[in-house]
Amino acid sequence: MGGSTARSGGAFWIPANPVLKREGAGDSLERGEKYIASVVEGSGPAERWKAFLEYGDETVKMLERMTQLSFFWAKGYCDYHPEEPGGRAAGRSVESRPFDLNKLGGQAIAGGMYAGALGAGIPVWTEAKLVDLEFTDSAVTGAILEQGGERVSVRAKVNHGDAIELAQKRLFPDEGAGRPGASVRR
């Protein structure tokens, strides 16, 4: 594990996420949407950033449940363009409190996510290359990866809309049973 993510302080920018709600930031998805629409100005597909907004909240909840990471609102770390519609001078950046590197040798958010993946029994391939995507109709249902000189097909068992709920039920025995997974074919 390495790269800039391993060296970063572990900040993320997701409007109206649970950390901001807990700490009284007063943010909303509508305000975040106005800001992104203003800053992006058609430079990327609206579906992509709208999905980011739609699933951001659940992503942060999952990180808090499945990892040892602890987050806080970096109040005052303003949005890059707070003057734009929906922008916030108080900011939306959330950072990770220090992560004990003795647990695995990684840092900040990358280390916490790595520990969470290992704890959930998810294999971590650091040399895998994406070769192609597999589609059913217009939805991505899997990927062809190259790992150790071998091509591997990794297929999702559920669509992304159901994945979060399924992971919640299966990863936490108190709330459900079993473990999430993906089928791997060689």
Image (cartoon, helix red, strand yellow):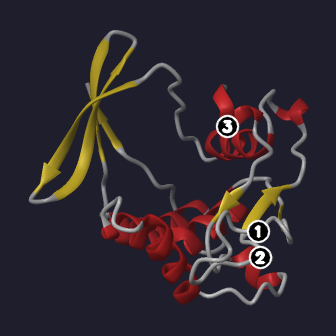
| Callout 3 secondary element | helix
Image position of 16 with respect to 110: above or below: below
Residue at numbered disc 3: 5
Numbered badge on residue 89 = 2
Residue type at tag 2: Ala
Where's residue 129, x and y in %? 37, 24
- When asked about the image quadrant of residue 47, the answer is bottom left
Question: In the image, 135: left or right of 5?
Answer: left
Question: In the image, 143: left or right of 74?
Answer: left
Alpha-carbon neighbours of circle 3 within 10 Å: few (<14), some, or many (≥20)?
some
Where's the C terminus, which quadrant?
Answer: top left
Q: Residue at x 34, y 59 (%)?
A: 44
- When asked about the image quadrant of residue 163, the answer is bottom left
Residue type at tag 1: Cys
- When asked about the image quadrant of residue 42, the answer is bottom left
Image position of 142 with respect to 180: above or below: above
Numbered badge on residue 78 = 1
Where's residue 68, x and y in %? 79, 53
Image position of 75 with respect to 112: above or below: below
